[in-house]
Image (cartoon, grey):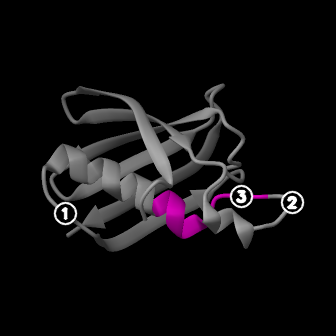
Amino acid sequence: MTDFYNIISNSSEGNKHAYVVKINEHHRVFEGHFPGNPIVPGVMSLMMIRECAERQLGHATRFAYIKDVKYIQAIVPNGEEITIKFDLDGNNIAGEVNDSTGVSLLKIKATLA
């Protein structure tokens, strides 16, 4: 889905990667999720993680298996940056999404295909 978020910066050290992104708080998805109290749909948070992994891998991918995903707090499109951090080990990905203060919002362990 285009224009849902913008990558502000990214960094890598070995298999560890971090992407700072800003969600488009005016995106049409928030018209229905939820009007007056928007939160990022779970599938959209997974999309952002997958797309950041694709940038590192250099090719399109999908989640073959999600071993564990834990939504700790809602991701709120409030104009602040969030950080998507993950480790890639072959096709395995383990990571988290943090708010601008470093609070963990989501954790994931999965296999990409």
Position in image of residue 45 (x %, y %): 52, 58
Q: Residue at x 65, y 33 (%)?
A: 80
Instruction: Give neighbour class at mark 1: few <14, some 14-19, many 20+ (Cα, 10 Å).
Output: few
Is residue 39 magenta-colored?
yes
Callout 2: helix, strand or loop?
A: loop
Type of residue at label 2? Gly
- Quadrant of the drawing holding the C terminus: bottom left
Position in image of residue 16 (x %, y %): 29, 33
Name the residue beneath numbered marker 3: 39
Q: Quadrant of residue 34?
A: bottom right
Type of residue at label 3? Ile
Type of residue at label 1? Ala
Q: Which residues are magenta?
A: 38-46
Instruction: Give neighbour class at mark 3: few <14, some 14-19, many 20+ (Cα, 10 Å).
Output: some
Query: Mark 2 or mark 1, which has the lower sequence index?
Result: 2
Q: Which mark is residue 36?
A: 2
On screen, residue 15 above or below 58: above
On screen, residue 22 above or below 107: above
Callout 1: helix, strand or loop?
A: loop
Callout 3: helix, strand or loop?
A: loop
Determine whether, in the image, residue 83 is placed left or right of residue 112. Answer: right
Name the residue beneath numbered marker 1: 60
Q: Quadrant of residue 59?
A: bottom left
